[in-house]
Amino acid sequence: MTDQADVSVSAPTEAAAAPSSSRSRLIPYAVLCELTHRCPLQCPYCSNPLELERASREIDTDTWKSVLSQAVDMGILQAHFSGGEPTVRKDLETLVEHAAKAGLYTNLITSGVLLTRTRLDRLRDAGLDHVQVSFQDTEAGNADRIAGFRGHAKKQETARMVRAADLPLTVNAVMHRQNLHHLEAMIAMAVELDAERLEVAQVQYYGWALKNRQAFLPTREQLDEATRIVEEARVRLKGILAIDYVVPDYYARRPKSCMGGWGRQFLNITPAGKVLPCHAAESLDFLEFENVTERPLAWIWEHSSAFNRFRGTDWMPEPCRSCDRREIDWGGCRCQAFALTGDPDTTDPACEFAPHRQVLEMPVGEAGGEIPEFVYRRIGNG
Amino acid sequence: MSERLILDAASVPRLPRHAKLRFDRARDCWIINAPERVFELDSIAGEVIQLVDGTRTLATVVDELAAKYDQAPRADIERDVTTMLQNLADKGFVIA
């Protein structure tokens, strides 16, 4: 049995060792459907691009249904409905039902602030398999300040509604220097909310989060304490609460296996229908992304220049090319390499052997310094 | 959930609502879909998991496999099945 943990969709989650298979037989596991970029929250680490898509550019219900059907035909197993806030789309139930009937495992990734019990019941009856609710902190004041929205109390209510509706719950907690001191409380909250799973997600520094890096990057001491807390809780809560946790890139010795490798397991569809190898890929501004309104999804997966640009190992520079981990971490994250060095083909600086490793010295050296104001995620702020 | 589940011969294991078993034609194997995770089962694990249906006890599952694979000692099968299912239970993908 192989534990294929790399269908993660939210930026901060971990991807485990990916299977090595020949390029011609790659079957994707999951599709992340970003139904909209509209969201009442303004989290300054949002994984959406700096250029947010407006509602008028969103693809319609029938196009999404076609995409979901095509995904099943390609061998995709899971559909994640995300955003922005996916529940602002009135056709969410229709899309969940279509996906579930087609055999996809359906996951709703939500802030929870707009959900009612009636709607949740409708989603469950439509075949929804799982709900992930994000939390900014355990303390309402700080949580609402980080989100730029008074929503913490409602999120807790929604999480309880999810369990009352007999749906499984993941608590997604994005942790950083301004809330890591509440990590133990966050774990306790996840248990109290009867979640099956807690994602202790560290901020990943692209897009909005890179703009706010100084406000979020924890110190080494904070991180070591967090790791200790998680390790202790994992033992104590074995079989009660599963905890996913990844050391943030800047303090890692090895890069994460971003998306389980570029174009190997995962595809992301933007509100406007563009198909990306990861949700941050538009930051690689030299790539051209195909659109589901113009090409079949399977063609885009197999043949588009964007998906083939960093697929496999042929593109790799040294030290990746001769590294025995090249098919484990796949060179790390292309978006991060490009954002930090300007060279999309270089080893991710999160690797200790990367030629540009020193670009992490400045931010890590300044971690724990003065906390700047947030640049909130909103149209026009990018 | 408040306590760790420890499986024994009398346990009646089943998959929780968020873990869904199905045969995947594209990969030609049984898989369990779970939040942000796919377990691809090899042929033996696939045989075991199909018997995990909320009606059979763990002992019955072992008996049926022992009858089917009569060249393997029952004790070995019991150990392997228990290990596999306890492992899944610890990750929250098998309940009883």
Image: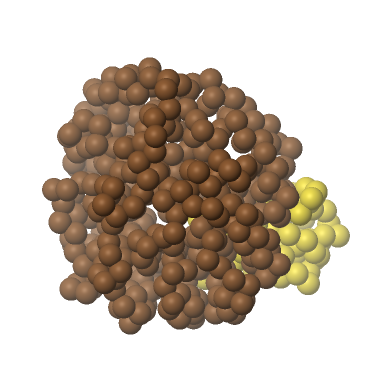
Chain colours: A brown, B yellow
Q: Position of residue B75 (x, y in %)?
A: 78, 51
Q: Position of residue A45 (x, y in %)?
A: 40, 43
* Residue A321 spot, x, y in % from top left: 24, 33
- Residue farthest along the right direction in this orientation: B10
Quadrant position of residue A208:
top left
Residue A330 in sight:
no
Q: Judge from the rendering whether residue A163 lies leftward or rightward of residue A129; answer left or right.
A: right
Q: Is residue A47 above or below residue A124?
A: above
Q: Is residue A253 left or right of residue A189?
A: left
Vertical side of A365 occupied by B40: above or below? below
Q: Residue at x 37, y 33 (%)?
A: A213
**Count of numbered circles in the view:** 0
Q: Is residue A370 left or right of residue A152?
A: left
Residue A333: x, y in percent? Answer: 31, 40
Residue drawn at (68%, 32%) of the image: A232
Q: Is residue A216 visible?
A: yes
Quick check: A25 above or below A186?
A: below
Q: In the drawing, does residue B67 fall left or right of residue A298?
A: right
Tell me the residue at 32%/37% (across/down): A210
Residue nearer the viewer, B95 or A174: A174
Residue at (58, 79) in percent of width and height: A122
